[in-house]
Image (spheres, grey):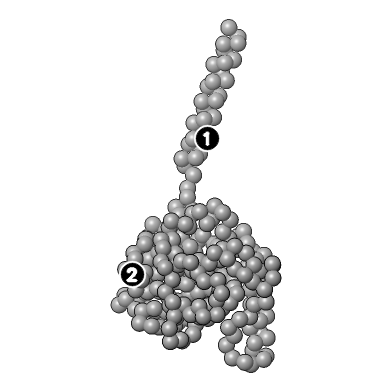
Amino acid sequence: MIKSKKLVIIGVVLLVAGVFLVGGAVGQITLEEEHRPDYVDCHYNESLLEKHQPELDLRDVDNQPSSMYAQYCTSQESEYDIAMYWAYYPVQDGYSSEDSHRLDREPIYVFVNESGGVEKDSYSTYHYLKGVDDNPNLNGTHTKKYVVSPHHQYVSQNFTSGTFVDLRDFSTVQDDWYQNGWKANPEVTYNPYAIEYHSSWWNEDTSLLDYRATEWYWDLMLWIDSIIGEGPITDISF
């Protein structure tokens, strides 16, 4: 009889624990739910993304990007739409083993005004630090960016002929990238409007050392360039 009561008690405990575990799993919010406000909508609108896709100058890049992941975003609280692009490189062959790795992803956010023209863009100027071009070089509605080898950051330059990389839906890979350790700040990838309030794509909560080291190095190279006085730099990375 005592044994039967113990079994009943154990069964009830397991049942209650199971309810809590299942409830916790069901109640767990996704990164999108956590970081994308209700007033922001992002989707894969191929025609609009093709219209505003950045034109890349890849003439000095040995390892070409295999695709460009993209989404088109609108906000009820902004006068601009944002066409968000991530150039995807299967590999980065740097100067040494320290800066070489599999997978490299480099952002360009194109701000589209009410008339459908390009207002400005934000892009990775070095190692996820943000650059802003309020008057970008354009080919129609395509912002033009030179890609610096070997780290694939961008420089705003004019050129005669560039490349349009194959577009793909960013939402099909975004969650997987984070599950596999991607360090980009989810606040500015699920809600690209948030990049206006950040100086980089780094997650400053979990990657503060990477962010500070990159920021320090970039400021140092800009200072050196100002002393040398050779004009705009196109490759400041070692």
Residue 159 in the image, given as x and y percentages of width and height: 46, 86
Q: Residue at x 58, y 83 (%)?
A: 234
Which mark, residue 183?
A: none
Which quadrant is the C terminus positioned in? Answer: bottom right
Q: Is residue 74 above or below residue 172?
A: below
**Can I make out residue 197 in this image?**
no
Along the line of sight, which residue is nearer the eye, 81 or 158? 158
Along the line of sight, which residue is nearer the eye, 185 or 37? 185
Q: Residue at x 59, y 68 (%)?
A: 92
Q: Is residue 119 left or right of residue 12?
A: left
Q: Within the image, what quadrant is residue 135 found in? A: bottom left
Q: Is residue 156 left or right of residue 218?
A: left
Which quadrant is the N terminus positioned in? Answer: top right
Which mark, residue 21?
A: 1
Q: As drawn, which residue projects farthest toward the left? A: 115
Which mark, residue 48?
A: 2
Q: Is residue 224 above or below residue 48?
A: below
Q: Say whether disc 2 or disc 1 marks the residue closer to the N-terminus.
A: 1
Residue 28 in the image, given as x and y percentages of width and height: 49, 44
Q: Badge 2: how crowded within 10 Å, few (<14), some, or many (20+)?
A: few
Q: Amino acid at mark 1?
A: Leu
Residue 216 in the image, given as x and y percentages of width and height: 67, 75
Element carrying mark 1? helix
Q: Residue at x 43, y 87 (%)?
A: 160
Q: Nearer the viewer, mark 2 or mark 1?
A: 2
Element carrying mark 2? helix
